[in-house]
Amino acid sequence: MTKEAELDFEGAMDRLEEIVRELEHGDVPLEKAIDLFQQGMKLSQLCGSKLEQVERKIEMITLEDGELRKKPFGARLEGDADDSL
């Protein structure tokens, strides 16, 4: 198991933010910048994967016609006309 796979979401995000700060600083040698970029891409994929797993687990319960029904996470609620979110 790799170091990245052992991280939880928050740990991966913290490390990703550190990498971004280091790369934005601008004085990183090219080889190290490439390595940091690769680490960042792996962490980004890990975070995306973890978010997808959580999203699949979450279901919204809504009241429709007097009955409770489950809807997948992200489904629009009936009458929700606010497209700005």
Image (cartoon, helix red, strand yellow):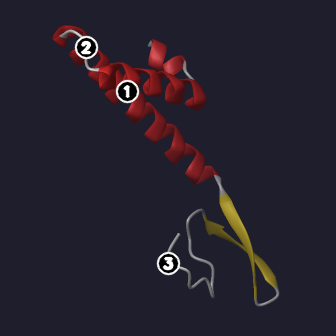
Of mark 1 and mark 3, the one earlier in the sequence is 1
The residue that mark 3 highlights is 83
Q: Which sits in the foreground, 82 or 51?
A: 82
The residue that mark 2 highlights is 27
Q: CA distance from mark 1 to mark 3?
A: 31 Å
Mark in front: 1 vs 3: 1
The residue that mark 1 highlights is 20
Q: What percent of the width, then of the height, locates residue 77?
A: 62, 79
Tag 1, which secondary structure?
helix
Of mark 2 and mark 3, the one earlier in the sequence is 2
Which corner quadrant of the image does residue 23 belong to?
Answer: top left
Which disc is residue 3 wearing? none
Which corner quadrant of the image does residue 38 belong to?
Answer: top left
Is any part of residue 1 visible from this angle? Answer: no
Mark in front: 2 vs 3: 2
Residue at (17% x, 12% y) in the render:
30
Question: In this view, which residue lies farthest toward the right?
Answer: 66
Residue at (52% x, 44% y) in the render:
51
